[in-house]
Image (spheres, rainbow, N blue to C red):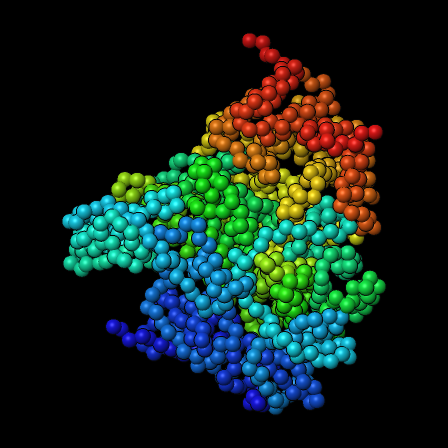
Amino acid sequence: MEKKRTGSVIKVNANMVTAQVEGNIIQNEVAYIIAGQERLKAEVIRVRANQAEMQVYESTQGLKVGEPVEFSNQLLSVELGPGLLGQIFDGLQNPLPALAQKCGFFLKRGVYLEALSNQAQWDFTPLVKTKDKVLAGSWLGFVPEKFFKHYIMAPFMLTGSLEVVSIAPAGKYNLKQPIAQLRDFAGHTHDVFLQQSWPVKIPIRAYAEKIRPHEPLVTKMRLIDSLFPVARGGTYCIPGPFGAGKTVLQQLTSRHAEVDIVIIAACGERAGEVVETLKTFPELIDPRTDKPLIDRTVIICNTSSMPVAARESSVYTAVTIAEYYRQMGLNILLLADSTSRWAQAMREMSGRLEEIPGEEAFPAYLESRIASFYERAGVVRLYGGATGSVTIGGTVSPAGGNFEEPVTQATLKVVGAFHGLSRERSDARKYPAIDPLISWSKYKSIVDPKHQEKGRLILQRSHEIAQMMKVIGEEGTSLNDYIEYLKGEFFDFIYLQQNAFDPVDEATSQERQVYLFAFICDILDSEYKLENKESALHFFQALRQLFRGWNSAEYNSKEFEEIEEKITIFLEEKKIVKAG
Amino acid sequence: MQKAYTNIIQIAGDVITVEAQGVGYLDIAQITCGRSVSLAQVIRIDSTKVSLQVFAGSRGISTQDKVRFLGHPMRVATGENLLGRIFNGSGLPLDRGPILSENLTAIGAPSVNPVKRIIPNKIIRTGIPMIDVFNSLVESQKLPVFSIAGEPYNELLARIAIQAEVDIIILGGMGLKYDDFLFFRETLNAHGALSRCVFFIHTASDPTVECLLVPDISLAVAEDFALKGKRVLVLLTDMTNFADSLKEISITMEQVPSNRGYPGDLYSQLAARYEKAVDFEGAGSITILAATTMPGDDVTHPVPDNTGYITEGQFYLKSAVIEPFGSLSRLKQQVNGKTRPDHRTIMDTMIQLFADYRQTLEKQSMGFQMSAWDKKLLKYGLFFEEKMMSLKVNIPLEKALDLGWQILADCFSPEETGIKLSIIEQFWPRD
């Protein structure tokens, strides 16, 4: 047994504490500062001679020089195993409901609980036999968790070919009972439990290969799925000024996106928004599984008033849990709100370390950190042949709504889709406030690419005419241009915008999107008998109203068909049938 | 008795450094300077060198003055005895009443466990249509009033305070003009609200650093009331002064500034205060309304910008009206679905049409011909500004919704509004 390495506090500067240490120091290892009855968790972030500079994951109020520090020998890790789904953790994987039971209203510092309850018994079914050869990450068996098969995997940290020495028979086990023994090539045997731990800042790489994201991830947001799609295993970012609706967008995506598991990382944002998720999700039923949404959700929340250092670790905690479930062949969506707060946490620490600041005082390593975070997304083929994916969607909160700032720019370099929110659109109460003129995506859409292109062109054209009209006025604009302009506005209003408070309109299925988009493209292509601008305006206003009702009618219902017929008749009346 | 230290080795700005041992981070110390005693707070410890920010400012401090550490963080008295009282930024009475020392509570307590919060669901009616109809204020909301110097933001805060149905009002003034302080006191007094108020006032003539404590003290007192089941409204004016004090201290401490001289942790600092707004499961609530003046009417200035990302919306006060664009209550959806079925329709439609009106105004100012539609919009815009936007209007929500339908009917035909037919049939005024 190694002797515990200790030290003592010599400097306190907000959440950065320096300790004088006897013996070796490991970079990024976890240490505990013993302040009276409390043990405050900290991470070593810089070593200078025999001094360890640590970021403390708690308030440092009342810390004194000379207080003892214990070093743990371990990097900051999370516990992975059955029982994660439906949980609400803080950035250090403390289960918040259990914490509330223990400490009441407030987050008492220095209280760390087991992330996964050891009380629970899990029904284990083995999948391998003794003498089988396996690899790290291979499925040894499974337990049922909510409505998933939660595979128990050979520990990710083992290397090379492993031989199964023993495997437990089917039965009930808790997290601390060994269910298998594996022997590595060096002849060491390792106990395997239902639970394993993994350092959060290192990606899990126990898979055969990473493949290119190709399948679309349907979010049921028409603007996203049709024009600026996201792929399973891809990455996207949503930058926008405050009040443009980033969080509402994330919340609706978390409800409707067609994935197996959603991990929500509420990083340095408002507590109220997390509360909404965690109070409503147990009651909302996922239409695809008929089970409460919370059963397929994990919430990591480190809201803005919680300690800053834990905010930095919360996104890593979230992505590690996402990777863990990916290893079971599931599709995971990680929503990080907001990555700017995470970057700011880095900036705060960097400032206290007195590092030479980069742009806007962000540290020079900002870009590489952001890149390596998003690179943890992807589709992987597992050793068993199944595929799993982690999709990462991060919001960015640029200072002053200016996309030129370092966090937005660093993020744009690495993501596959960009959904830029604009103040103008949100002021005009357009939801989602994603600006189609600046957004882009490198992934494949669910609609016909020709239609997708047409949609984009009409918006572009309509915008150009609108700009021109500001200069030359409506009277200086030709009727044809004016109709083009109205078509763009119409497309924007009835397709791109959705009513987030209408139970039908808030989520549009893939099938309906394809149908609707084709229908609208036909309208955009057709010419109508419109004598003057006034009648053109009326025509599109009336059409708009009809579509509004159509959008809130259940797909393929009687109401849906009735309105469709009305629209068709309305259009036929004015349509110019081209000869030939 | 705690040991006193007399070895001050550095005085820079309002920060002094003293050699001392066994001092806790963020502890409070008393500095005896001549005949006056000032409070100071530990903000950095480097082995035996302890740096403190002196709330009364460092002017006149001698290197031989006595620094006595009290061995605890800043505390404030709480409870019913505070009602009707006026204190300064350090919690000392300004009203010749007794110094209070009961139920001392440490300021800057840990944050609330998110799972112990509840979803806000109670509207706070203010009688101002621009708030009640378009951006409803909700109990436990944190909302700043973005404004510029000279706008009547303090009047707006006072008016909301008087009309809002809350149990206790706490006013935290930072860099408040003495006249404004008197205005608050007189207005609240005139409406018989003074006996449920507590004032923590830092006036413009007080030392800058003292204003750093005002939000924490106000919110610590509020939290105590809220835990006892009271609904508390906290008014903070003006948070830009608070941010400027933070800037001053951080520059003195030679921290790397991030944006226009403000410290990199400005967001976290502001959030730590605003996040105190809460609706406790099974107890009371704290609602925060804060004035934030924007230097140069620039919403991208670091203070309003960071604030906007923290708070649940903002009221944008410009030319003495609450501007519909830029104003937002993020929690309105929690309450405006339960008031009247036409509330959301009126809210959305009137704003969309008002946006169109603004565009038409632009066109008009460039001398373009006004179409029939433009003329309708111009008429609508004028009605809207006069009957809805003006802060003189003081009507209950239901009256305001009726008025909304009336204005729409006076200006447009139903299909021009884009409202769903089912709603039109139910609510469009028939004459």
Residue appearing at x 50%, y 85% in the figure: B21
Q: Quadrant of residue A195?
A: bottom left
Q: Quadrant of residue B426?
A: top right
Name above or below for residue A219 compared with residue B8: above
Residue B423 percent across, percent down from the top left: 70, 32
Q: Nearer the viewer, residue A271 or A438?
A: A271
How many marks the image carries: the answer is 0
Q: Nearer the viewer, residue A454 or B162?
A: B162
Q: Is residue A101 left or right of residue A571?
A: left
Residue A403 percent across, percent down from the top left: 56, 49
Residue A58 percent across, percent down from the top left: 48, 67
Residue appearing at x 58%, y 83% in the figure: B70
Q: Is residue A8 left or right of residue B76?
A: left
Q: Is residue B406 left or right of residue A127?
A: right
Q: Is residue A299 left or right of residue B430?
A: left
Where the C terminus of chain B falls, by quadrant? top right
Residue A4 percent across, percent down from the top left: 31, 75
Residue appearing at x 69%, y 50% in the figure: B123
Q: Quadrant of residue A526?
A: top right
Q: Nearer the viewer, residue A109 or B417?
A: A109
Residue appearing at x 73%, y 49% in the figure: B131
Q: Nearer the viewer, residue B179 or B371?
A: B179
Name above or below for residue B424 compared with residue B47: above
Where the N terminus of chain B falls, by quadrant? bottom right
Q: Is residue B59 visible?
A: yes
Q: Residue furthest top?
A: A580
Name above or below for residue A271 compared with residue A249: below
Q: Is residue A418 visible?
A: no
